[in-house]
Image (tube, rainbow, N blue to C red):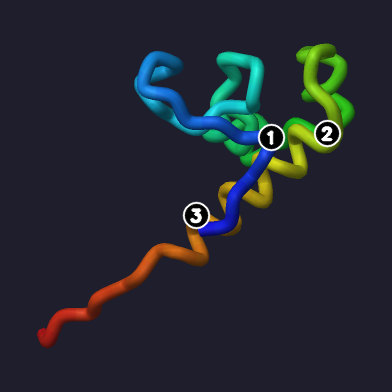
Amino acid sequence: MTEHSRISLAPDVLAGKPVISGTRIAVEFIIGLMADGWSEADILANYPGLSREDILACLAYARDSLSAERVHPTAA
């Protein structure tokens, strides 16, 4: 998987979930907000410590995680 400089994984932060570096805000949380209809402007207004680049890094991390996923079909 591609390395993402704005995303970090540490066992002692949110049980090792990927977070925005320097925060305890999980990639999963940001993706969830967007899935719930929050805009980039909504997120930045409610989390002023974040930047547009942080949000884009979350999206890129999610994209790369999904692209690395492999499906192994079984015979029916």
Q: Is mark 1 in CB contact (under 8 Å) with mark 2?
A: no
Cα distance in 3D space between marks 3 and 1: 15 Å
- Identify which amino acid the numbered label 3 is placed on: Ser
**Label drawn at residue 76:** none
Residue 73 location, quadrant: bottom left
Circle 3 residue: 65
Q: Earlier in the sequence, mark 3 or mark 2?
A: 2
| As drawn, 43 above or below 72 | above
Residue 24 location, quadrant: top right
Cα distance in 3D space between marks 3 and 2: 21 Å
Cα distance in 3D space between marks 1 and 2: 17 Å
Circle 1 residue: 6
Q: Residue at x 36, y 22 (%)?
A: 11
Circle 2 residue: 40
Q: Secondary structure at mark 3?
A: helix
**Residue 20 left/right relative to 71:** right
Q: Secondary structure at mark 1?
A: loop
**How dense is the environment of label 3, judged by Cα within 10 Å: few (below 14), some, or many (20 and up)?**
few
Which is in the foreground here, disc 1 or disc 2? 1
- Identify which amino acid the numbered label 1 is placed on: Arg
- Identify which amino acid the numbered label 2 is placed on: Glu
Q: Is mark 3 in CB contact (under 8 Å) with mark 2?
A: no
Which is in the foreground here, disc 3 or disc 2? 3
Spot occupied by residue 28 in the image (x, y as percentages of width and height): 53, 34
Q: Secondary structure at mark 2?
A: helix
**Residue 21 left/right relative to 40:** left
